[in-house]
Amino acid sequence: MIAKIENELREFIREGRAILGICNGFQVLVESGLIPGLNNVQVSLTVNTSAKYECRWVYLKHVNNGKCLLTREVPKDRVLRVPVGHGEGRFIVSDEDSLKEIINNDLIVFKYARPDGSEADGEYPYNPNGSVMDIAGICNIDGNVLGMMPHPERAFFRWQLPDWTRTSNAEGYGDGYYIIESIVKYVEKKF
């Protein structure tokens, strides 16, 4: 599929247009080389260390310093609760130099975290798949392509949250709203 539209897709990205790949979409972006988009940097999404399909709510920490244009409206260090649902979501890199390139270029956008926002340190279930450095989402070098394993669209409204019946008000938005709204604002400003 990518081979048929590769030139058009790369032009779309060069124009600064937004692309969001969630779960399997993140896998497609990685396999096509659109994320991270750095020469000689090899990444992959592979089988969870539990060797099971993981379907649970997790905590994400927004760690990007502004490189990702699509999450600029999400405050840095904000902790968000969103669900995951995947069997092959463990983010890995081919070598230490590739990881350094990703870090040095500020491409890590979201990391799995503990409820208080502290690092998951690879500990299950906070890091549900064993991703290196607890990486849950990254962007491309230009910041307009975002890939992430968790599903913000499944936490858009408050009534989608697992504890919504215990809250006094099920109206309003869940934490996924902040990610989606940030992308919408980028598109509105850019185009």
Image (spheres, rainbow, N blue to C red):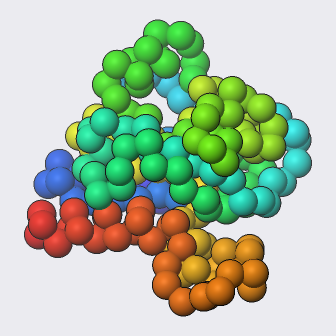
- Say which residue appears at 54% left-offset and 73% top-offset: 174
Where in the figure is residue 182, as x and y percent of width and height? 31, 63
| Residue 107 occupies quadrant | top left
Image side of residue 66 versus residue 91, left or right:
left
Where in the figure is residue 65, as x and y percent of width and height? 31, 36
Give the answer, above or below, for where 20 lies relative to 166: above
Image side of residue 80 versus residue 83, left or right:
left
| Residue 164 occupies quadrant | bottom right
Give the answer, above or below, for where 164 lies relative to 44: below
Residue 84 visible from this viewpoint: yes
Quarter of the image that includes the C terminus: bottom left
- Say which residue appears at 74% left-offset and 75% top-offset: 163
Where in the figure is residue 187, as x and y percent of width and height? 21, 67
Where in the figure is residue 159, as x and y percent of width and height? 63, 84
Name the residue nearer the viewer: 78 or 145.
Answer: 78
- Say which residue appears at 34% left-offset and 29% top-offset: 106
Give the answer, above or below, for where 89 lies relative to 17: above
- Say which residue appears at 41% left-offset and 62% top-offset: 179
Residue 40 visible from this viewpoint: no
Q: In the displayed image of the protein, which residue is found farthest to the front?
A: 168
Q: How many labels sit on residues?
A: 0
| Residue 24 occupies quadrant | bottom right
Give the answer, above or below, for where 133 lies relative to 81: above
Name the residue nearer the viewer: 61 or 145.
Answer: 61
Image side of residue 28 versus residue 81, left or right:
left
